Amino acid sequence: MIPAATVARFHNALPFWMSLLLIPLAVIGALQGGWTVILLPLFTWYFFSILDAFIGLNLENADLEATEEDLKWYRVITAIWAPLQFVLLFWMIWYVPQAAHLGALEKVVLFFGVGVITGTVGINYSHELMHQKNKAERWMGDILLAMVLYSHFRSEHLLVHHRHVGTPRDPVTARYNEGFFRFFARVLPGSWKSAFEAEKAMQARRDRPWTHPSNPFFRYWALQGGMLLLALVLGGWIGLLLFAWQAFIAVWQLELVNYVEHYGLTRAHLGGGKYEHVKPQHSWNAAHKASNWLLINLQRHSDHHYKPDRRFPLLQNYTEAEAPQMPYGYPIMTMAAMVPPLWRRVMNRRVRRWREMYYPEITDWKPYNKATNPLPR
């Protein structure tokens, strides 16, 4: 008989397993075609937003003294997602190009949905895994990123974003009044360059050239090349194009989240190229219960920056007095971000209120509003 404590632990973690429902939806879309090819984005964006509206906020915090056994079933979902996504993605790369019942538009829309889940779930889970000390987990994070051709995100996130968030040195901090599409065009080359430069500097500190085999970019390129080759072998040129399409959509999903997480929030410049320490007030948060199930508590973003290696079930909630709050969960907010006038109408007044609350002494915000290194390094 299964111990009651084990059943209780599994029951507590079960809502975070809802991401697994996306896998049969992808299979249904591939096998049935027609209107079912839109199930993935509909479920990911709208279903969880509707759930948020009905079940509201989760303001409770987990016990930080939880044991590894208490966290077991939370860890399992992030551990099993990488092999499940790998099998699903490459089965679809093999099956869809030869599926006579699927038209060209259906294939494109279907892999748009695949990109939504490899971005919304896959990259998000890789984010959780890359922060852990366990090598196997970090490798799974690398494999997930290679499936969307964005392996450098690990270096950019760990070496640049966490260190320089809220400053001009961080490419993925969206500036005040910067629309998403301008941000996206800036961040694609900017994040790659900053990641490469960070790893190059890391090698230099060890008196090594950037070409040293320990530079993770060689691992990134090998993994990504392997994924591209496998897509070509299984699906031919059509499969390769569909693989690249889902990767682009996944990256678009990631950068939408990056855009909303820190939009307009800046750390005070102290002079001499120095900035204040990162605080809870430098991240937008959302306590919406269902979207936090989907995003494994990513919306408790202030606490993630406070304790980057803290596992997602232990991330703590911050009140409106401690950190800025979004009016809706990330799924709705990322959709709003794709309509810049709507985004500015919703968020700019909140940024101004945030400035008045945390930095009443700063009267000239013009240097902080620019999108390209307005302050001294």
Image: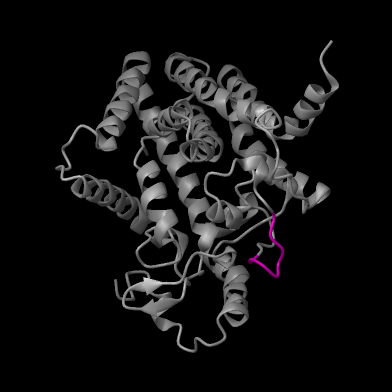
Image quadrant in which the N terminus is located: top right
Q: Residue at (16%, 38%) from the top-left corner?
A: 211
In the rendered image, residue 320 lying in the magenta stretch gets the answer: yes
The secondary structure that most of the magenta stretch takes on is: loop
- Outermost residue, top side: 1
In the figure, is residue 269 to the left or right of 59? left
Please give left or right for residue 19 compared with residue 162 in the image: right
Q: Magenta region: which residues?
A: 317-324
Question: Where 322 sits versus 154, above or below?
Answer: below
- Which x, y percent locates residue 99? 48, 15
Indicate the quadrant where residue 22 lies: top right
Q: Where is residue 74 shown, x and y percent of the image?
A: 66, 31
Q: Position of residue 244 (x, y in %)?
A: 37, 33
The C terminus lies in quadrant: bottom left
Work out whether residue 335 can be spotted: no
Q: Is residue 270 above or below residue 172?
A: below
Measuring 41% from the left and 35% from the top, which residue is drawn there? Answer: 247
According to the image, what is the colour scheme of the structure?
one colour
Coordinates of residue 264 in the picture (x, y in percent): 50, 69
Queried whether the magenta region covers residue 300, the answer comes back as no
